[in-house]
Image (spheres, rainbow, N blue to C red):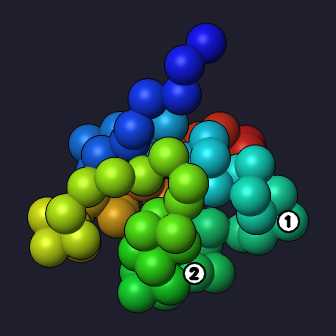
């Protein structure tokens, strides 16, 4: 399966990649600035950093929380 590039709207896929990369992290302990930087550093992520706002980061955080519960 080809790994497609992720954009800010791919909150679930981003969350899954973050879970793989940071399996012991509680997403509720992250500041949005840190979460944003981690997303930008993901290998599959390829989108304009300026297109990210608080709602986007909330969606990623919520997806991450729901996947680890």
Q: Earlier in the sequence, mark 1 or mark 2?
A: 1
Residue 29, quarter of picture: bottom right
Q: Is residue 64 visible?
A: no
In the rendered view of the protein, which quadrant contains the C terminus?
top right
Q: Is residue 20 left or right of residue 9?
A: right
Residue 26, quarter of picture: bottom right
As drawn, 24 above or below 16: below
Check disc 1 and report its element: helix, strand or loop: loop
In the rendered view of the protein, which quadrant contains the N terminus?
top right
Q: Which residue is mark 2?
A: 30
Residue in the image at 19% along x and 63% along y: 48
The picture places residue 40, in percent across and down from the top left corner, at: 43, 68
Q: Which residue is mark 1?
A: 24
Q: Is residue 37 left or right of residue 56?
A: right
The picture places residue 30, in percent across and down from the top left corner, at: 57, 81
The picture places residue 44, in percent across and down from the top left corner, at: 50, 46
Residue found farthest to the top: 1
How many numbered marks does the figure carry? 2
Check disc 2 and report its element: helix, strand or loop: loop
Q: Residues within 10 Å of mark 1 (few under 14, many from 20)?
A: few
Residue found farthest to the right: 24
Q: For this rendering, which residue is in front, 2 or 24? A: 2
Residue in the image at 41% along x and 74% along y: 36
């Amino acid at each position: 399966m080809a790994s497609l590039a992720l954009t800010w709207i791919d909150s679930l896929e981003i969350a899954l990649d973050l879970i793989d990369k940071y399996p012991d992290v509680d997403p509720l302990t992250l500041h949005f600035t840190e979460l944003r930087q981690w997303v930008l550093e993901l290998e599959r992520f390829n989108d304009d950093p300026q297109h990210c706002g608080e709602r986007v980061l909330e969606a990623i955080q919520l997806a991450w929380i729901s996947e680890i519960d």
